[in-house]
Image (cartoon, grey):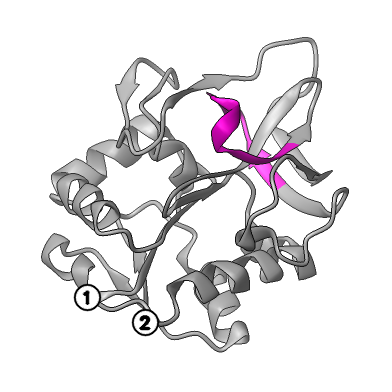
Amino acid sequence: MIGIIDYGMGNLYSLSKALERLGYSYEFVSQAERLQEYSGLILPGVGAFGDAIANIRELGLEQAIKGYAATGRPILGICLGMQLLFEKSAEHGDHTGLGLLGGAVVRFRGDYKVPHMGWNQLMIKQKQPLLNGVQDGDYVYFVHSYHVLCQSDVLLATSDYHQEVTAIVNRDNVYGMQFHPEKSGETGMLLLRNFAVQCEGVLT
């Protein structure tokens, strides 16, 4: 059973429907004491970093998420949810994130359109089971005005939008996708399936 963390700012409907199409069971969870019940967690997110981390803290979820990650079970952040996994963000002020991964969230800056919106290609940096079946150049769907600066050792894939853009990250059991896999066609569904496979057989 996969838990989708509901802290009031996630794109829950399309994500849950994607898991249903893949045949995986899920529940929405917003109670900190229940996180440990699941074999995997997904942290979605749409909106501003500051509001999101404030909601997480108000619900008492911050330490519960960190505690869950420490058990070694898989956790996946999607879009804003991926950004929340990092140490800090400069979105509308300075904010401290969950700190499960090292790095910072910054705004796109340049003479080009922001947000980065639409289909863009993945450039694979490291092969890992999460990327099984995914090819260099496959397209996924992005919508974001801020992006993550992080160390190369956590980068599984990047994209290009006037610069190298962090697209997929991983360290140990912590995963992140800047794009929306649930809106990214066959490639996105493959990535979600690969994550769900990581959750299979995990003891709760």
* Residue numbers of the magenta segment: 142-158
Give the CA distance from mark 2 to mark 1: 8 Å
Q: In the rendered structure, does residue 113 fall within the stretch colored magenta?
A: no
Q: Which residue is mark 2?
A: 1
Figure quadrant of residue 124: top right
Figure quadrant of residue 166: top right
| Numbered disc 1: secondary structure | helix
Q: Amino acid at mark 1?
A: Glu
50 versus 32 height, above or below: above
Judged by its main secondary structure, the magenta piece is strand
Which residue is located at x 61 percent, y 69 percent? 194
Which residue is located at x 54 percent, y 36 percent? 154
196 versus 107 height, above or below: below
The quadrant in which the C terminus is found is: bottom left
Q: Is residue 155 left or right of residue 13?
A: right
Q: In the rendered structure, does residue 150 fall within the stretch colored magenta?
A: yes
| Numbered disc 2: secondary structure | loop
